[in-house]
Image (tube, rainbow, N blue to C red):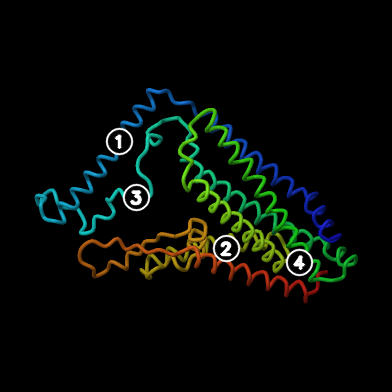
């Protein structure tokens, strides 16, 4: 317990951590204030016009679906049936994630229900970056300056010290993520109540938002663990930053271009970003042009990867890096 308390104090007094916390608060404050300034309470006339526009859009979608069905049945003139696929599912309103609503046609009005998920994605992205940088700098600075050696003089058990550092980091990030999320979403909920519209928040709105948030927090912990482990293996904070930059440039950008040039089937399966998307959103929807080669008629060339596969890949990668970091910390010379 004394070791964990000591690590918490060391983490809290680090200037880099304090700077990142300040930037976190500043980014959230700027976003909230900008939204507040750019929003207003809609008048009854604006709401009525928006409701009428949404109703017309829904009618247009239904009309397009019926025309597609008529084209499939052959009751539509050939010149009008051109361009409709054999399967009209894509035009079916019942298959859409959501139908047009009045809020879609209100300009300059913040709608909390519509914007909560995009705002939460922004929060998760910032927390992932925050967790990775803090995790990498936390152990990287101690290794490069000899702070770990001084700590081992007081507590000469390497695995216990290393585990306490990682556990303290993950615990502190969990608390920061919970507090930041509550303050962030709470601020925008107040904006929706006072200077915009709260929107429809019944049904599965809060459960689905909570599930997204939970997945985001897990992703933050994965990122912090990966940054911590890579910095341990490289003995420098810069090692983690360099590794991520090299991966993004060489693999995510360079290899992606090569795969598109040589037309490799399902090239997205080789990208870590695919599994990040699958885990965070619940299902990654991808397109593969090679699936439609030699196929006559309509072919969308799409496929899906579920969250389970995304979680398995992230666990395998993070677990492998963590085990390698523990092994390196236990055996090598730290001076």
Q: Which mark is residue 163?
A: 4
Q: Earlier in the sequence, mark 1 or mark 3?
A: 1
Q: Nearer the viewer, residue 295 or 5?
A: 5
Looking at the rendered structure, the secondary structure element under dot 4 is helix
- For disc 4, the neighbor class at 10 Å (few under 14, some 14 to 19, many from 20) is few
Q: Which mark is residue 55?
A: 1
Q: Which mark is residue 231?
A: none
Q: Earlier in the sequence, mark 3 or mark 4?
A: 3
Q: Earlier in the sequence, mark 1 or mark 4?
A: 1
Q: Are marks 2 and 3 in contact (CB under 8 Å)?
A: no
Q: Quadrant of the C terminus?
A: bottom right
Q: Residue at x 18, y 53 (%)?
A: 69
Q: CA distance from mark 1 to mark 4?
A: 58 Å
> For mark 3, what is the residue?
96
Q: Position of residue 115 (x, y in %)?
A: 48, 41
Q: CA distance from mark 2 to mark 1?
A: 50 Å
């Amino acid at each position: 317990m004394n070791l964990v308390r000591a690590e918490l104090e060391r983490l809290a007094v680090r200037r880099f951590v304090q700077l990142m916390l300040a930037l976190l608060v500043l980014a959230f404050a700027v976003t909230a204030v900008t939204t507040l300034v750019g929003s207003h309470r809609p008048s009854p006339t604006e709401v009525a016009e928006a409701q009428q526009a949404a109703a017309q859009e829904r009618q247009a979608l239904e009309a397009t679906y019926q025309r597609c069905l008529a084209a499939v049945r052959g009751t539509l003139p050939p010149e009008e049936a051109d361009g409709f696929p054999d399967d009209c599912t894509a035009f079916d309103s019942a298959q859409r994630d959501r139908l047009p609503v009045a809020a879609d046609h209100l300009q300059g009005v913040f709608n909390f229900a519509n914007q909560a998920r995009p705002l939460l994605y922004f929060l998760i992205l910032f927390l992932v970056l925050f967790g990775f940088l803090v995790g990498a700098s936390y152990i990287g600075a101690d290794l490069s300056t000899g702070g770990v050696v001084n700590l081992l003089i007081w507590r000469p058990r390497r695995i216990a010290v290393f585990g306490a550092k990682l556990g303290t980091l993950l615990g502190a990030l969990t608390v920061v993520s919970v507090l930041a999320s509550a303050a962030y979403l709470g601020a925008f909920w107040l904006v929706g109540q006072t200077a915009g519209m709260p929107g429809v928040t019944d049904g599965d709105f809060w459960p689905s938002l909570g599930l997204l948030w939970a997945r985001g927090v897990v992703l933050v912990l994965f990122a912090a663990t990966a940054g911590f482990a890579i910095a341990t293996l490289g003995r420098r904070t810069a090692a983690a930053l360099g590794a991520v930059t090299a991966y993004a440039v060489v693999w995510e950008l360079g290899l992606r271009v090569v795969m598109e040039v040589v037309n490799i089937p399902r090239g997205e399966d080789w990208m870590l970003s695919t599994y990040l998307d699958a885990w965070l959103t619940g299902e990654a929807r991808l397109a593969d042009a090679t699936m439609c080669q030699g196929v006559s008629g309509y072919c969308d060339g799409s496929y899906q990867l579920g969250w389970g596969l995304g979680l398995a890949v992230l666990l395998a990668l993070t677990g492998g890096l963590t085990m390698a970091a523990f092994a390196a910390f236990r055996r090598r010379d730290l001076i």
